[in-house]
Amino acid sequence: MNRLRIHTQIHSRYRVFDSSGQLPFSIVFGLCRRSPADTDPRPLLLETAGSALDVPYALAHGLLTLHEQDPEDAKRWVQVDLSWLSNVAPAKGLECLSLPSPVTRTEHWRDAFTIHQCPIEPDGKMTSLLKPGKKYTIKLASDDLGVTRWEYSDRKELIGNDSKPSHGPGAIKIVNSKPTAGKATFKVVNNLPWPPQVETRIHLPLSSSPSDSPLLEVSVLNTGSTPVTVQTRGHQRVLIPWGLFQPAPDALDDRTRIIHATPHKPPTSSLQVIESATGALVRGSQQRGIGSLMASNADRRPKVEDVIQLDPGVPGVRTIDIRALVDGLKDGQYKIRMQAKGCRWWHGEISKEECENGRVPAHLCASAIASPLMLESQDEVELHVRDGKVVF
């Protein structure tokens, strides 16, 4: 049988599976045509349902394997018996994937993966296998991707029987091109700690004179029923989404958050300046910060001055000098937008009395990683620049 080799990678979207379903969870697949023998210039269209990319079906039919970590030996993984799952049918409504040809590719192959996310439902058959507190990994059982329908086509989906057979005389089997395709590793929890909803607003306050520095006022309102303590500077130890090889873009960003109380410089890293006439981004696309290197024995707990408390119904207000952000803009009309940024958080108040050496208590820092409290706003602030100055 002829074999069409596809470079395949597997990862989990998050390192945690929330059994309650509050955090959507998926297994991420990346496929890339990079075999030297793959010389067809047309896109390769393949059906994901009933293949290794259809995770519940693939586990039930031996295309994927599930392994549980041994609690006594973290390096030992025990394969889970899935024989009773044999009646799982192919998923309905899964997308077809179109893989571009390598013949005309100009970018590096690592940037040419076609991404497929297979959602894992909290009430599905697979979920009944997963035990809270346990750690699991999912891998390809062999190089067989289990694809039964595919064709070279510019279309977005397969129509009728216009597809290549995967069995019988002259059949071509789609397989993984590498000895390994990576793995999707995750820990199962009953439910994740979830932050309260906060409402963030931004606006330009009225200036007292044209010579004043342009200011932006930011208010954050805790709409929950209990106080919450939020980290505004330093390493944000929160649950983040992953791509195939690394965290998703902008997931690792330890720059000072916009509500930091005593910034050494204005915390404008989450702000963008958009030219109103063209919609072009003119400020705010600088590279994200991921924090400085630290010694292995350094105290990684947040400092007391790097956290703030948000009480229910009481807005936390910050006034920020945005002179450096808008300085040098050519005359015209602009909009200021705020990018969403996540923060580490804790329920309740952290009093100075319970802090240790000016830092957040160790027992709080050792708690499980939670979903971030998101600072995000739909507000757009209009800004007019004339003769190089902001006009109020």
Image (cartoon, rainbow, N blue to C red):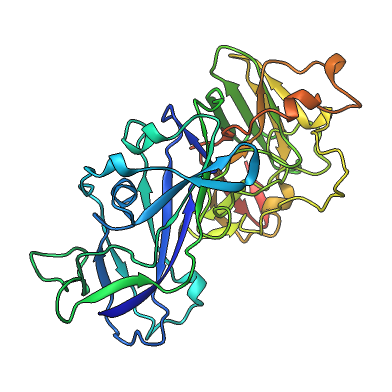
Which sits in the foreground, 135 or 377? 135
Of all residues shown, which one is farthest toward the top?
225
Of all residues shown, which one is farthest toward the left?
160
Position of 268 with respect to 119 (left or right) is right
Question: How many numbered circles are shown?
Answer: 0
Q: From the image, which quarter does the C terminus lie in?
A: top right
Position of 295 with respect to 4 (left or right) is right
Of all residues shown, which one is farthest toward the right?
357
> On the image, which quarter does residue 122 sit in?
top left
> On the image, which quarter does residue 330 sit in?
bottom right
Which sits in the foreground, 342 or 1? 1
Q: Looking at the picture, how far across and down is residue 45, in whole percent?
A: 25, 69
Q: From the image, which quarter does the N terminus lie in?
A: bottom left
Position of 211 with respect to 47 (left or right) is right
Residue at image position (51%, 77%) is 108
Residue at image position (69%, 60%) is 328
Is residue 222 placed above or below 334 in the rendered structure?
above
Position of 36 with respect to 212 (left or right) is left
Q: Looking at the picture, how far across and down is residue 243, in whole percent?
A: 51, 55
Is residue 182 placed above or below 228 in the rendered structure?
below
Residue at image position (55%, 56%) is 332
Q: Looking at the picture, how far across and down is residue 170, in whole percent?
A: 17, 82
Q: Looking at the picture, how far across and down is residue 182, in whole percent?
A: 51, 60
